[in-house]
Image: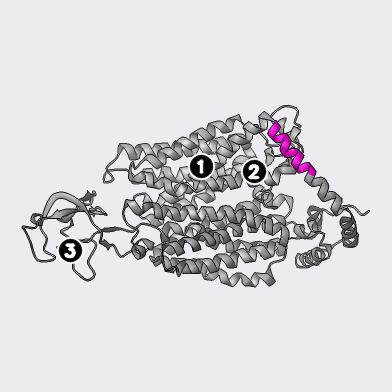
Amino acid sequence: MAAALDFDDILTEIGEFGRYQRRNYLLICLPVLFAAANSLSYVFTAGTPKYRCYIAECDADISPEYQTDWLEHAMPGTWDKHHQFTPATCDRYMANDSSYDQAGQCSSSQFLPQTERCNQFVYDGQEQTIVQDWQLTCKENAWKLALVGTIHFAGLVVGTALFGYLADRFGRKLVFLFCIIFMAVTGVAQGLAWDYPSFLVFALLNAVGTSGVYPLAFIIGVEMVGIRKREMSSIVLNYFYAIGEALLGLAAWLLHDWQLIQYALSIPPLCFFVYFWLVPESVRWLLARNEHEKAGVIIKRAAHVNRRELSLELLANFKQQQLDAQNNKPQQKSHEERKIWLAVKQVFASRTLVIRYIIMLYIWAVNAIVYYGLSLNSTSLSGNKYLNFALVCLIEIPGYSLAWLCLRKLGRRLSLSGSLLLCAITCVTSGYITLVQSDKATRNNWLVITLFLIGKLGITSSFAVIYTYTAEMMPTVIRSGGVGIMSTFARCGAMLAPFVPLLGGYYESLPLLLFGASSLTAGLLSLLLPETFNKKLPDTVADAIALGSKRIARTSSSSRCSHSPQKESNI
């Protein structure tokens, strides 16, 4: 029987990150830009524009203006430090039937001090969202706008589970291409939606397609490079994701129309159908499926592009490996299935592991709710909401870099706890400033925004650390499924995130204080977890239970789980 093929050994011959891998890596990164933008497009397509009551006694019948000189007489509102009046959205002063002026010449004598609700509205005109098209105005309809975000996260849950299985069954490349095209088609359909229910249906389908683009790009990218380049490949892909989110803010700033935004994010990805001929299948997947001949063709092409020579011994080994794998496959599959179920039973029988994994589930949920909640809440900050959104997205780049540095220098436990506590301190401080300086006209808005950005940096770093940390605490036989369960649970928790900003309508600082309190408890609980840095990965449940004790031998850095667990959760 021939020696087992190890693709990492093959990469030492063809190059860990040569010209062939660099070209393909760039190709798979490009769709991630559009997946990131689509993943948060509802922030602007289902956003709330500026609007006020239509005042029949004063407004023009055709094309009334949002901002006029008489608004303060006709409706309640607030004044800012620049003496600019912001009218209430859904309330107006009752008309004084005993006093009438010419339209456009309104005065305080035409209105009584009592207020009433209105059912006709005048919009700012600088932004067109689904609110105008389907009259989703006032607090009684706010839940409908938040529901768009929840439907989106529901689609992510479905898509993550579905495409993870399909990628294992039919290959990374085909499912990756399907997700891109499906995301593009349903995104265009979302722009063509004729009413609110149809918009929700297409938003759900769009999220299902979007959910597969980033994870599969991640898998393809990590599986094409050598051990020393895995951390780099995961970090750079996250950079592309953050840039894609920021580009959404730029598109919304330039286009101002929800349908145009949707088309701009969805039509260009249709061009990626050419990847069928440009992007190769994952060699690791082909080897795992015993497709040694197809893998050999790709390896030879990579060696040619990278200007490397393959050894005769490696070339001769492919055919023998295929025959050996076919003979052993039924027995190996049955044995692996028995090992998985035995490990699951052992985990539930261990009080140590049950408590440990419950803590991890809570931390995952907090990460998801705070991470997405801060992104959604960014548009409610004072100042230019498009710029605020872009900054909150771009701050993820130093956040991922911070995680990368801390993982190497501080270990897993302190990196996770420190990131969460950083987020907690800044969110609570920002909420406290908002609470104390309740008058927006005198509030130090730049200080609030700065603290907000630091909080997003902290939670981004935490999210990056939690993937690695979780994989290193799981036994090998259930590591893939374990991280997958944690990630799915986090996405279920994220379904609550769109509703958290609604609390700001009742108590402005409440969302930030809630984010801070939950991050604080998660950060403290993480200190109860064992350190896994520079330790041998647990192969068995007994090894996982023993983590944190002196029985686990320290190993060299080559034994660390340096690859991203997002790959583990989808393979």
In the rendering, at what x and y percent does residue 211 appear?
58, 57
* Mark toward the start of the polypeptide (1 vs 3): 3
Q: Which residue is mark 3?
A: 56
Number of labels in the image equals: 3
Residue situated furthest front in the rendering: 197
State the residue in front, 473 or 152. 152
The region drawn magenta spans 338-349
Q: Residues within 10 Å of mark 1 (few under 14, many from 20)?
A: many
In the rendering, at what x and y percent does residue 402 appear?
56, 44
* Mark toward the start of the polypeptide (1 vs 2): 1
What SS does tag 2 mark? helix
Q: Which residue sits at x=41%, y=59%?
A: 46
Is residue 250 a member of the stretch shown in magenta? no
- In the figure, 156 relative to 293: above or below? above
Q: Is residue 192 left or right of residue 570?
A: left
Q: Amino acid at mark 3?
A: Ala
